[in-house]
Amino acid sequence: MAVLCAQSTEAPAGKQRLQILDMTGSHDDGLERGPDTLSLWSRTVTLAKSCVDIARRQSEETAGVSKRRRGAEDAAPPLAADHSAVCVEVRVDLFVNSTSYSVLREALLVGAHGPLRLQCRDLRAEELSLRSTVCLLELLNPAGLRQIDLRFNNLGLPGLNTLLPYMTRFTRLQSLKLPYSNIDVRRLSPTAEDAMHNFASQICRLPALKELNLGSSRLSGRLRQLLGGLRTPLESLELAFCSLLPSDLHYLSRSFHVSSLKKLDLSGNNLSDVLFQPFLQLLGSASSSLLHLDVMECKLSDSSLLALTPVLCRCRCLRYLGLFCNPVSAQGLRTLLRSSLIMCDLRLVIYPLPAECYLGGSPGPDASHSASEGLIAQFKAEVQEVLVRAQRTDMLWTTDMVIHRPPEYLSL
């Protein structure tokens, strides 16, 4: 639900005049949540259209008043308020794609001198062209922007290097998310090496950056190059499906970022083999600050969980743990569950269905049709019983990633 917060000041004749309307709220990834709930995309479109319509009506009214005044020079001025003096700053989170781009661009253009001026806090753009993204960045007021989230835009290193200079004007930018940007360092040409160097240097020009998401980029062996020049330590780092190497995790565990990390997402990296020991070292180094850990789809087995649990329990501040889609048994999960009971701050665990719940003994390509509903219900009841007996009903263990989504870093 969006946060509605208004500020007003005294207007002529003792009346209050609205100055700021705060409509920022939680991210909902563009999905409809119910018949009476607008998605972030729908809210953006509705608000943008309202800004354009109100500006158009004000322009027409102003033109009408001027015409009447010219026709009756001796008449008293109209009693209506001077709309040109009315300006409301509307603070919002915006979600734009190719369908909604035109109306949002128009709203930002008319808002520069209109009655409703959009002040974007968090911008999310999906499947938007490079040219359109540049245009939006040029139109946004840099004062209040704290997050830029560009998804599925297939920009590659050349596109990102074009965009990053436009981001340096956002001096309060804390979060930069660039997942699915089509970066693959495993096939860089000599020219692309220069582009990679430029990309790393441009990232370092964002002085307030605390969160970086480079998910689904192939960054094998390049974390030192990318993060080594940052001016301040990161507090959130998302590297899902990044084909990381042991050298990347060794660098992180010794870097100045590690003692500040609150959120770490390593999902989709194979942590069961050569990355496992570097991962344990990294987790131990980050244990004093870590609040959120995602290791979904990392091929962690029972033996991995057994070795991981003691280090995990040292993360006494941990609030969220994502383990979904790892091949573990019911016994492995029971061991982790019992050990996690001492973690007082842990509130949400997204766990995988045990291997025994699948008719073939493990999840197949069509796991949704091969799982036993009876075994699933039995194990879920067992988990709940353990939590109740330990008086830890404040902690939720669930396999549902849709309803119980992990918190955003900026809301931690």
Image (cartoon, grey):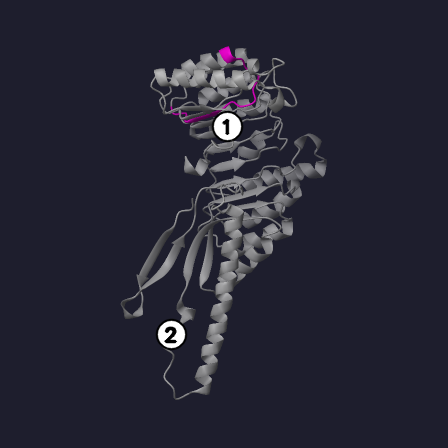
Q: Magenta region's main secondary structure?
A: loop
Residue projecting furthest to the left: 14
Q: Camera-side residue: 403 or 271?
A: 403
Looking at the rendered image, the disc whose residue lies closer to the viewer, 2 or 1, is 1
Left of 176 or right of it: where is 262?
left
| Residue range corresponding to the magenta coloring | 317-331
Dot 2, crowdedness within 10 Å: few (<14), some or many (≥20)?
few
Residue 279, percent across and down?
Answer: 52, 20
Instruction: Check if residue 62 falls in the magenta segment.
Output: no
**Which residue in the protein does label 2 denote?**
80
Q: Camera-side residue: 186 or 214?
A: 214
Give above or below for 366 relative to 149: above
Instruction: Check if residue 319 falls in the magenta segment.
Output: yes
The disc labelled 1 sits on which kind of residue? Asp
Q: What residue sits 53% from the left and 56% below the top?
A: 139
Quarter of the figure that contains the C terminus: top left
The disc labelled 2 sits on which kind of residue? Ala
Residue 403, percent across and down?
Answer: 48, 33
Q: What residue sits 36% from the left and 25% below the top?
A: 394
**Which residue in the protein does label 1 denote?**
400
Q: Earlier in the sequence, mark 2 or mark 1?
A: 2
Q: What residue sits 54% from the left and 36% below the top?
A: 213
Residue 70, percent across and down?
Answer: 46, 85
Q: Toward which corner of the image does residue 277 lie, by quadrant?
A: top right
